[in-house]
């Protein structure tokens, strides 16, 4: 027995380790924003749901999404094209997203990293992306109250793109600071650059197309600039220059570094590009996306506006093993995402259940933006007014019994039209016993919708002033 106890402990430990290893690995993709829903609201609800799922680490494991970029264009034969580093691209994307989510500290850190990484290789830099990053970097610094850092960013931006015009959406104070930066730059010393290269190649300076080489004596503000020369077959040359006077650049192609194969450390992962409609294309993009981080499941979502004060999140769970989607119950919350905590909790509960029991897969395409149905709610004592309400309130065969709520005085209401002469007055019978009045009992039976109901009106004589009424009425319900 003493030997069995250690063995049992080992078995329990192995079983616990095995159970932990078998926890489903889930990637929660950033929720897409539909018509009327802001990126901020979608990100807030995504963050709430992510926190709820992370708190359930006893039954599942949250996996960070992989870094993605657009699929590269087809390469020309004999030429190996280089592109921006994946780290620089990811840093710029993270910085721009943080700026849109009003997380300015994260935005400044990532944008600086992305700009530096992108311009480290002038031959492959995404200059349009760098321009947008410079604007957001300066704006984020201003929003944080870091005026010195913001003005420094504007100076660098004005040197990089002296002819850039801010859009009308920026506040006037930001526009004035940008104009001041350009004026300060004009007062600084200038220099010139001459660019030469193979015949037919095109020269670029800080991303601006200067035309075919040679380019002579281009006057530019002093400081750091970036030269790129692109050949007719897609060859690329890049060089960083520090302009303090005349600078000459001579580009050449065909070196070992230019034509050597570029081996990426990781395969290119294409963004699944989630929209309101999930189709076979979404499936084919999600499978390699999840396999790249060894994940089993993906939770995707689409947030859209349903009323002036309400947003709805349509979500679905994707299984790599099955290669199919399971649509989840849509949840709704206010446009400021103040009431979304409960909905995030309910949605996380459903996700956990579906990880255990996937259920019937949804047929493609899956529409995440279906409008939620509004049910007609009847009060407890409400009487349905039409057949639709009767169906909503219960089965058609349910019996409804209506009882008279008060006594009926025949003289206060006209007699029913029976299609024949009213019966003659019946004189009171003295032997019937004296009663001060006459009661009328009405029996009403409703058997089923469309059945005939018979109203029996029975009269009893009396010595009072009421006129007795007799007869039978048959009406169709």
Image: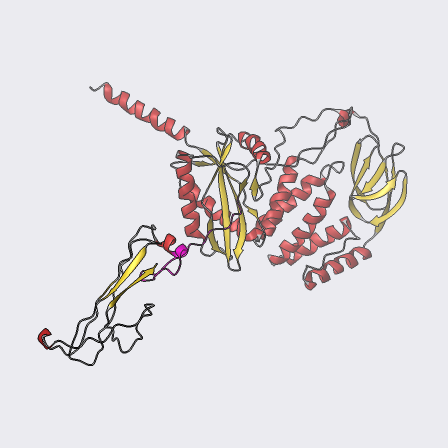
Q: Does the magenta stretch include residue 384?
A: yes
Task: State which region is magenta.
Answer: 368-389
Scheme of image coloration: secondary structure
Q: How many marks?
A: 0
Q: Position of residue 374 (x, y in %)?
A: 45, 54
- Relative to 432, 251 lies left or right: right
At 33% from the left edge and 61% from the top edge, which residue is drawn? 475
> Quadrant of residue 401 in the image?
bottom left
420 vs 249, nearest the viewer: 420
Residue 116, x across and y down, in percent: 68, 42
Residue 380: % across, % down = 31, 60
Q: Does the magenta stretch include residue 371?
A: yes
Against 78, is 199 above or below? Answer: below
Q: Residue at x 31, y 53 (%)?
A: 448
Where is residue 295? Give x, y as percent.
50, 32
Say left or right for 110 vs 329.
right
Q: In this view, does 252 lie above or below 402?
A: above
Q: In which quarter of the image is the C terminus?
A: bottom left
Q: Which residue lies furthest to the bottom in this view?
A: 465
Residue at (44% x, 48% y) in the render:
344
Residue at the spot 79% in from the left edge and 33% down from the top edge: 236
Q: In which quarter of the image is the N terminus?
A: top left
Residue 55 visible here: no
Q: Is the magenta stretch mostly helix, strand or loop?
A: loop
| In-front residue for pair 385/235 | 385
- Taking depth in this image into account, of 417 and 420 the one nearest to the observer is 420
Q: Residue 436 versus residue 314: which sits nearer the camera? A: 436
């Amino acid at each position: 027995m003493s030997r069995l106890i250690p063995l049992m402990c080992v078995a329990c430990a192995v079983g616990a380790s095995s159970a932990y290893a078998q926890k489903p690995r889930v990637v929660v993709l950033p929720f897409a924003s539909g018509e009327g829903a802001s990126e901020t609201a979608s990100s807030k609800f995504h963050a709430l749901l992510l926190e709820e799922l992370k708190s359930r680490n006893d039954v599942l494991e949250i996996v960070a999404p992989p870094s993605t970029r657009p699929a590269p264009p087809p390469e020309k034969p004999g030429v190996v094209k280089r592109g921006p580093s994946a780290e620089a691209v990811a840093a710029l994307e993270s910085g721009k997203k943080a700026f849109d989510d009003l997380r300015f500290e994260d935005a400044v850190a990532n944008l600086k990293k992305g700009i530096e990484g992108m311009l480290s290789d002038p031959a492959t830099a995404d200059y349009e992306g760098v321009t947008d990053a410079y604007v957001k970097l300066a704006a984020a610094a201003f929003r944080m109250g870091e005026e010195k850092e913001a003005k420094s960013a504007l100076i660098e931006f004005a040197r990089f793109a002296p002819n850039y015009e801010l859009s009308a959406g920026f506040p006037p104070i930001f526009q004035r600071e940008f104009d001041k930066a350009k004026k300060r730059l004009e007062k600084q010393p200038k220099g010139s650059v001459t660019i030469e290269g193979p015949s037919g190649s095109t020269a670029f300076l800080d991303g601006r197309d200067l035309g075919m080489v040679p380019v002579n004596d281009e006057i530019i503000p002093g400081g750091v600039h970036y030269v790129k020369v692109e050949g007719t077959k897609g060859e690329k040359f890049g060089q960083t220059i520090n302009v303090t006077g005349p600078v000459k650049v001579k580009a050449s192609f065909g070196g070992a570094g230019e034509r050597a194969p570029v081996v990426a450390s990781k395969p290119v992962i294409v963004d699944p590009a989630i929209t309101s409609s999930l189709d076979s294309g979404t499936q084919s993009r999600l499978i390699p996306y999840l396999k790249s981080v060894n994940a089993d499941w993906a939770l995707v979502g689409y947030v859209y506006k349903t009323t002036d004060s309400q947003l709805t999140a349509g979500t679905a769970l994707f299984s790599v093993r099955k290669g199919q989607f399971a649509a989840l119950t849509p949840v709704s919350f206010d446009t400021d995402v103040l009431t979304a905590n409960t909905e995030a909790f309910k949605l996380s509960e459903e996700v956990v259940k579906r990880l255990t029991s996937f259920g019937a897969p949804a047929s493609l395409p899956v529409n995440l933006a279906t409008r939620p149905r509004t049910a007609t709610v009847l009060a407890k004592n409400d009487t349905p007014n039409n057949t639709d309400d009767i169906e909503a309130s219960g089965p058609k065969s349910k019996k409804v019994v209506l009882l008279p709520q008060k006594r009926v005085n025949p003289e206060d209401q006209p007699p029913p039209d029976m299609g024949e002469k009213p019966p003659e007055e019946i004189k009171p019978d003295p032997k019937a016993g004296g009663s001060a009045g006459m009661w009328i009992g009405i029996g009403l039976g409703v058997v089923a919708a469309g059945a005939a109901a018979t109203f029996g009106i029975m009269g009893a004589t009396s010595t009072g002033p009421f006129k007795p009424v007799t007869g039978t009425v048959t009406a169709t319900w």
